């Protein structure tokens, strides 16, 4: 088990997430980092924006599913970036929520 995966699992356990959540979140973090061919700790806000665009435009996922993917990234990448990822993700998730309201 990699250090990043172990850290993410510990964070999810610390936050008392359901036992079904970690495998889902791990898959999303893997899906996020795979196209960039780098581990999540080597990715930044630009990569998150590209991932969001891929989910909504190329894969045509619903706004709610995109929001779930972005939220799932949070415990997987918090602490790996020098910036406050939570405050970076908040407007992206807000945009998705606005799209959901406008349906």
Image (cartoon, rainbow, N blue to C red):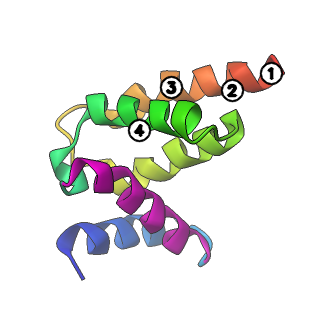
Is residue 71 within the magenta segment?
A: no
Q: Do the residues labelled 1 and 4 touch (CB within 8 Å)?
A: no
Instruction: Quickly name the residue at label 3.
Output: 92
Task: Return the residue found at the far bottom.
Answer: 1
Residue 49's mark? none
Residue 7 location, quadrant: bottom left
Contact between labelled residues 2 and 3, with CB atoms less than 8 Å apart: no
**Circle nearer the N terminus (3, 4):** 4
- x and y percentages locating residue 12 in the rendered image: 46, 66
Category of crowding for the residue at label 1, using alpha-carbon neighbours closer than 10 angstroms: few (below 14), some (14–19), many (at least 20): few
Residue beneath the point at 29% across and 75% down? 6
Tell me whether circle 2 and circle 4 mark residues in contact (CB < 8 Å).
no
Q: Main secondary structure of the magenta part?
A: helix
Q: What is the quadrant of residue 14 in the picture? A: bottom left
Residue corresponding to mark 2: 97
Q: In this view, does 41 lie above or below 60?
A: below
Q: Which residue lies furthest to the right in this view?
A: 103
- Answer whether labels 1 and 3 touch (C-beta < 8 Å): no
Spatial CA span between label 1 and label 3: 15 Å
Callout in the foreground (3, 4): 4
Residue toward you, 24 or 55: 55
Q: What element carries label 1?
A: helix
The answer to which of 90 and 65 lies nearer the viewer is 65
- In terms of secondary structure, where does tag 2 sit? helix
Q: Residue 25, percent across and down?
A: 49, 62
Q: Which of pointers 2 and 4 lies earlier in the amino acid sequence?
A: 4
Residue that mark 4 sits on: 51
Residue 101: quadrant of the picture: top right
Q: What stretch is highlighted in magenta?
A: 20-37
């Amino acid at each position: 088990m990699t250090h990043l995966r172990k850290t993410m699992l510990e964070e999810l356990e610390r936050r008392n997430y359901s036992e079904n959540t970690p495998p889902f979140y791990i898959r999303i973090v893997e899906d996020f980092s795979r196209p960039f061919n780098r581990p999540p700790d080597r990715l930044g806000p630009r990569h998150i924006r590209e991932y969001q665009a891929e989910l909504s435009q190329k894969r045509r996922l619903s706004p709610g599913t995109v929001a779930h993917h972005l939220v799932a990234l949070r415990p997987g990448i918090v602490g790996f970036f020098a910036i406050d990822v939570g405050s970076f993700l908040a407007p992206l998730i807000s945009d998705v929520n606005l799209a959901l309201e406008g349906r």
